[in-house]
Image (cartoon, rainbow, N blue to C red):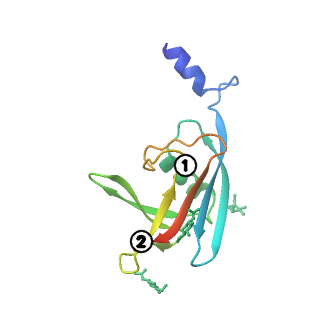
Amino acid sequence: MALTAISLLYDHSGQQEQIPIKVTVTNKFANTKVSYPTAVTVGMPMFGVLNKLKDTNNSFTFTYSINKCFGIYLESVNGLAGSTENHTYWELLFPQSFAGIGCYQPKKNENFIMNFTTWD
Ligand SMILES: *[C@@H]1O[C@H](CO)[C@@H](O)[C@H](O)[C@H]1NC(C)=O
Ligand SMILES: *[C@@H]1O[C@H](CO)[C@@H](O)[C@H](O)[C@H]1NC(C)=O
Ligand SMILES: *[C@@H]1O[C@H](CO)[C@@H](O)[C@H](O)[C@H]1NC(C)=O
């Protein structure tokens, strides 16, 4: 049983399977939209994907804080932070169900959108 589970994660060459996905950063106030195509290991949560992207592409960066109850909270993307004063935040558009970046595992060819937006 354990062997079956492992063989799903590794391809025939013994490498961990990589799948293409895209991370898109949009901000309609600044009229910007940048997509970062990347390849990720199957099963890697979004948090790991974002860290890997940050390490491999110096035009992408993000900061976060850890909330004791709610987990990882995204604070800023590419130098721009949400603010309570301006009622702005980074809306995360998960391709499937709502999930946190700490546990969402992207599937092949998914586009993960980070959208700078406002609340009323
Ligand atoms: C970083 O991402 C941008 C936007 O997708 C792309 O134009 C650029 O080539 C990437 N740089 C590297 C080093 O991959
Ligand atoms: C609020 O928005 C203004 C105008 O876009 C900006 O100059 C200011 O830095 C923002 N405040 C914060 C705390 O982000
Ligand atoms: C991003 O947020 C703006 C509002 O600020 C909204 O109009 C737009 O539909 C959002 N983009 C996506 C892809 O949901």
Give the amino acid type for the residue marked by disc 1 in the picture.
Val
Q: Quadrant of the C terminus?
A: bottom left
- Given residues 92 and 43, the one toward you in this image is 92
Mark 1 Cα shell of 10 Å, populated few (<14), some (14-19), many (≥20): many
Numbered-mark total = 2
Residue matched to label 2 = 119
Q: CA distance from mark 2 to mark 1?
A: 27 Å
- Given residues 26 and 54, the one toward you in this image is 26
Instruction: Judge whether 37 appears above or below 60 on screen.
Output: above
Q: Earlier in the sequence, mark 2 or mark 1?
A: 1
Where is residue 84 drawn, in percent x and y? Answer: 35, 75
Q: Give the foreground label among 2 and 1.
A: 2
Query: Dot 1: what SS?
Result: helix
Residue matched to label 1 = 49
Query: Dot 2: what SS?
Result: loop
Residue ID at (54%, 65%): 115
State the residue lying farthest toward the left: 68
Residues at circles 2 and 1 in contact by the CB criterion of under 8 Å: no
Give the amino acid type for the residue marked by disc 2 in the picture.
Trp
State the residue lying farthest toward the top: 1
- Given residues 31 and 77, the one toward you in this image is 31
| Image-quadrant location for residue 8 | top right
Ligand 2 found in image quarter? bottom left
Where is residue 110 drawn, in percent x and y? Answer: 63, 46
Where is residue 12 drawn, in percent x and y? Answer: 69, 22
